[in-house]
Amino acid sequence: MAKKVVASLQKAGKSLTKVIKMVKSEKTGAYMFKQGMVPNEKVQEFLSKK
């Protein structure tokens, strides 16, 4: 099934990047990971958000 997902992303015509960001929780102090599929132009915007 993963091959179908990758093939559909390549056909979309947009270059996407999987971004994983480590964020510290204010309540518990533990670290969490936020991830998302972002167009290449928006990677820096995604990483700069808190």
Image (cartoon, rainbow, N blue to C red):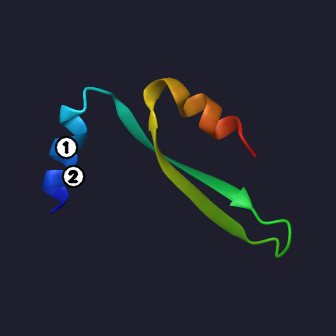
Instruction: Give the CA distance from mark 1 to mark 2.
Output: 5 Å
**Quadrant position of residue 23:** bottom right
Number of labels in the image equals 2
Q: Is residue 32 left or right of residue 41?
A: right
> Quick check: marks 1 and 2 in contact, CB under 8 Å?
yes
| Residue occupied by mark 2 | 5
Pick whichever, 12 or 30, lies toward us: 12
Q: Which mark is residue 26?
A: none
Disc 2 on helix, strand or loop?
helix
Residue with the most extreme top position: 41
Relative image position of residue 30 (x, y in whole percent)? 75, 72
41 to 33, vertically: above or below: above
Between 31 and 10, the one nearer to me in the picture: 10
The image quarter in which residue 17 lies: top left
Q: Could you tell whether 50 is left or right of 17 in the image?
A: right
Q: Residues within 10 Å of mark 2 (few under 14, many from 20)?
A: few
Residue 38 horizontal/vertical position (percent): 47, 38
**Amino acid type, residue under disc 1 in the picture:** Ser
Drawn side of residue 36 relative to residue 44, left or right: left
Helix, strand or loop at disc 1?
helix
Residue lying furthest right: 27
Q: Position of residue 43 (x, y in %)?
A: 54, 32
Residue matched to label 1 = 8
Near mark 1 (Cα within 10 A), the count class, few <14, some 14-19 or many ≥20, is few
The picture quadrant where one finds residue 13 is top left
